[in-house]
Image: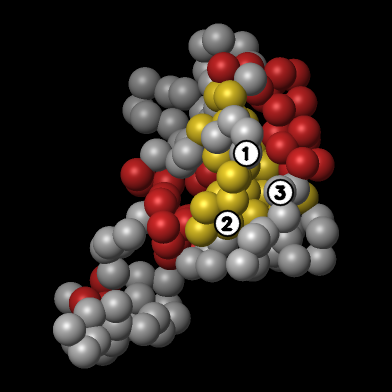
Amino acid sequence: MARDIDFDLIKEAKELASRCYDGKNHHVAAAARAPDGRTVVGMSVSHFLGGPCAEVVIIGSAAAQRIYELTTMVVVGLAGRVLIPPCGRCRQALFDYFPSMDILIGDPPAVIPIAELLPLPYRRWLTDPRGVSSMGGNHEDPFAGR
């Protein structure tokens, strides 16, 4: 099934990155769409302790706005000129919080489900005898029947 490209979301992320990029502390911007159409944005925070990526900032910002589901995200770098995929750490966090989320990457942009960007995610429930994920929900066992 072909999925539509959310060009408005891309535009918003690029404008945020262009506006906030400072070459030192804020390198990457991201924007995400909630099912009701609201947008959540975030900027990376560079720090000598290792600051959070823009995608992780969005997870917290969404929760602060009582948004607990996000459907689509776009991440941009180089002051908003390039759509980039989330790093491995962010892919895992996004998969844990929003396992059916789509990510917009590339030029021209393409829609890639987060599960395809992270084909073999760590799943805490595989090591937890209670069968719960690190996020508290139950997930299907991808290895069942293999």
Which residue is rendered at x = 47% and y = 23% of the image?
46
- Judge the density around disc 1: few (<14), some (14-19), many (≥20) Cα neighbours within 10 Å: some
- Work out which quarter of the rendered image holds the N terminus and state it: bottom right
- Work out which quarter of the rendered image holds the C terminus and state it: bottom left
Q: Which residue type carries mark 3?
A: Ile
**Image coordinates for residue 116, horizontal then vertical, percent:** 41, 57
Q: Which residue type carries mark 2?
A: Asp
Which residue is rendered at x = 77% and y = 35% of the image?
12
The mark nearer the N terminus, 3 or 2, is: 3
Nearer to us: label 3 or label 2: 3
Q: Which residue type carries mark 1?
A: Pro
Residue 43 in view, yes or no: no
**Image coordinates for residue 140, horizontal then vertical, percent:** 36, 84
Labels 2 and 1 touching (C-beta < 8 A): no
Q: Which residue is mark 2?
A: 102
Labels 3 and 1 touching (C-beta < 8 A): yes
Question: In the figure, residue 10 lies in which quadrant?
Answer: top right
Nearer to us: label 2 or label 1: 1
- Judge the density around disc 3: few (<14), some (14-19), many (≥20) Cα neighbours within 10 Å: some
Q: Which residue is mark 1?
A: 109
Image disc number at residue 5:
3
As helix, strand or loop, the secondary structure at mark 2 comes to strand
As helix, strand or loop, the secondary structure at mark 3 comes to loop
Question: In the figure, residue 49 lies in which quadrant?
Answer: top left
Residue lying farthest top? 23
User: In the picture provided, is 7 more to the left or to the right than 88?
Assistant: right
**Cα distance, mark 2 to mark 1?**
12 Å
